[in-house]
Image (cartoon, rainbow, N blue to C red):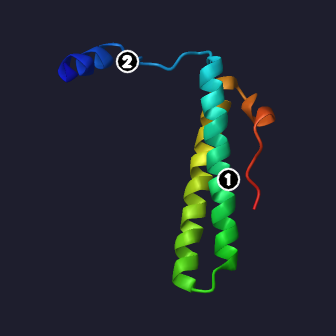
Amino acid sequence: MYQNQNQYSQQNRMSQPPAVLSTKDDAYLTDALSWELLAAKKANSFASQCSDQQVKHQIEQLCQLHEQHYRTLLSHLSDNQQGQANQNYPHFHN
């Protein structure tokens, strides 16, 4: 049964994303942007409070990773919506 489901999902995959996002897609992307932004802000805050330099460096890298994920999502939205996403979503600021 699992093999049949796997074949079904492979057959129905889109080769290109749709030109218009559904309401559900938009809600998920908004949530994902919020999660990445929150994780980056928390990591930045924790790094500023850390006294161990090795731990601080690791947390700063984690912050940068979440910032990168946030910017990647935002750039995909910007590319898809021709700049409209820049007006709808907050930008990350340290």
The answer to which of 87 and 43 lies nearer the viewer is 43
Residue 65 in the image: above or below residue 15: below
From the image, tell me which residue sits under label 1.
38
Res 27 visible: yes
For marks 1 and 2, the one nearer the N-term is 2
- The answer to which quarter of the image holds residue 56 is bottom right
Secondary structure of residue under mark 1: helix
Q: Which amino acid does label 1 sit on?
A: Leu
Counting labels gives: 2
Rendered-image quadrant of the N terminus: top left
Residue beneath the point at 64% across and 37% down: 31
Seen in the picture, residue 93 relative to 23 is either above or below; the reply is below
- In this image, 84 relative to 33: left or right? right
Q: Look at label 2 and name its amino acid.
A: Arg
Residue 85 or residue 27, whichever sits in front: 27
Q: 50 above or below 68? A: below
Density class for disc 2 (Cα within 10 Å; few <14, some 14-19, many ≥20) is few
Does residue 90 appear to the left or right of 40 in the view shown?
right
The CA span between labels 1 and 2 is: 31 Å
- Of helix, strand and loop, which one carries label 2? loop
Can you give x and y, in whole percent of width and height, for residue 49 in the image? Answer: 69, 78
**Percent position of residue 47, x then y:** 64, 73
Q: Is the residue 20 above or below the residue 61 in the image?
A: above
Residue at numbered disc 2: 13
Q: Which quadrant is the C terminus positioned in?
A: bottom right
The x, y position of residue 83, in whole percent, is 74, 30
Side of 84 relative to 70 (left or right): right
Res. 79 in view: no
> Image point 62% across, 55% down: which residue?
39
- Residue neighbourhood size for the residue with mark 1, other residues' Cα within 10 Å, grouped as few (<14), some (14–19), many (≥20): some
